[in-house]
């Protein structure tokens, strides 16, 4: 969170490691991080930001699938034709009951994308905040990428052949704790 050059901090830090998985599954965050996990984490982040006295915060996110998850009751192309017809009626989409399911979905889907907000957008607005999404393939616009690069660099230069995972974890925690406020500020203001 970028409050000022001297009062900027990393909020929502959540360091976790992979657990026991099937031998062919990845043991990194890609296998564990999903929309449900993200929305729970985002709820905590908003509470943390508000506890710091911040209101009307704009959260910047990339286009990761878990950032843009829609409400569970959002119509899906896998729904039965009768349910899609009912959804079309609810959203005032002109279709005929004799249309193919594929045609019905092709007319309904673009309407949904303009009328239904991702869950995190609704969560943020309900608390007086906002969410904006960066254009696809622009990780350079993500402050977290610059913060992460700084932390990885600080941890990486300490590596030796005797470094253990516990050492890396300890150094990672220390790097985040000692991250200067002005570094966070400059990454966000980038």
Image (cartoon, rainbow, N blue to C red):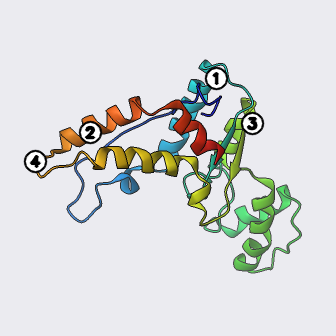
Of label 2 and label 1, which has the lower sequence position? 1
Q: Position of residue 141 (x, y in %)?
A: 62, 55
Label 4–label 1 contact, CB within 8 A: no
Query: In the rendered image, which quarter is residue 105 located in?
Result: bottom right
**Earlier residue among tags 3 and 1:** 1
Residue at image coords 34%, 44%:
154
Q: CA distance from mark 4 to mark 1?
A: 42 Å
Choose between 60 and 119: the one closer to the eye. 60
Sequence-first disc among 2 and 3: 3
Residue located beneath label 1 in the image? 50
Task: Give the x, y percent position of residue 180.
Answer: 48, 32
Q: Closer to the camera: disc 4 or disc 1?
A: 4
Circle 1 SS class: helix
Q: Dot 3: within a 10 Å radius of its alpha carbon, few (fewer than 14), some, or many (20 or more) residues?
A: some
Position of residue 164 in the picture relative to residue 5 (left or right)? left
Report the disc number at residue 125.
3
The residue under the point 36% across, 36% down is 175
Helix or strand or loop: what does disc 3 sit on? Answer: helix
Residue marked by disc 4:
162
Q: Residues within 10 Å of mark 4 (few under 14, many from 20)?
A: few
Rounded to the nearest whole Å, what is the CA distance between mark 2 and mark 3?
A: 35 Å
């Amino acid at each position: 969170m970028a409050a000022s050059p001297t009062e900027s901090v990393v909020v929502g830090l959540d360091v976790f490691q992979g657990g026991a998985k099937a031998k062919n599954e990845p043991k990194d965050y890609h296998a564990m991080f999903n929309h449900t996990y993200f929305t729970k984490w985002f709820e905590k982040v908003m509470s943390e930001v508000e506890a710091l006295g911040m209101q009307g915060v704009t959260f910047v996110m990339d286009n990761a699938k878990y950032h843009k998850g829609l409400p569970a009751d959002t119509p899906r192309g896998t729904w039965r034709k009768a349910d899609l017809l009912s959804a079309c009626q609810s959203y005032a989409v002109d279709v005929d009951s004799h249309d193919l399911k594929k045609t019905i979905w092709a007319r309904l889907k673009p309407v949904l994308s303009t009328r239904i907000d991702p869950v995190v957008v609704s969560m943020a607005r309900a608390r007086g905040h906002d969410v904006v999404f960066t254009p696809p393939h622009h990780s350079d616009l993500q402050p977290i990428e610059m913060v992460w690069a700084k932390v990885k660099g600080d941890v990486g230069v300490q590596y030796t052949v005797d470094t253990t995972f516990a050492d890396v974890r300890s150094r990672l925690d220390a790097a985040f704790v000692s991250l200067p406020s002005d570094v966070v500020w400059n990454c966000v203001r980038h």
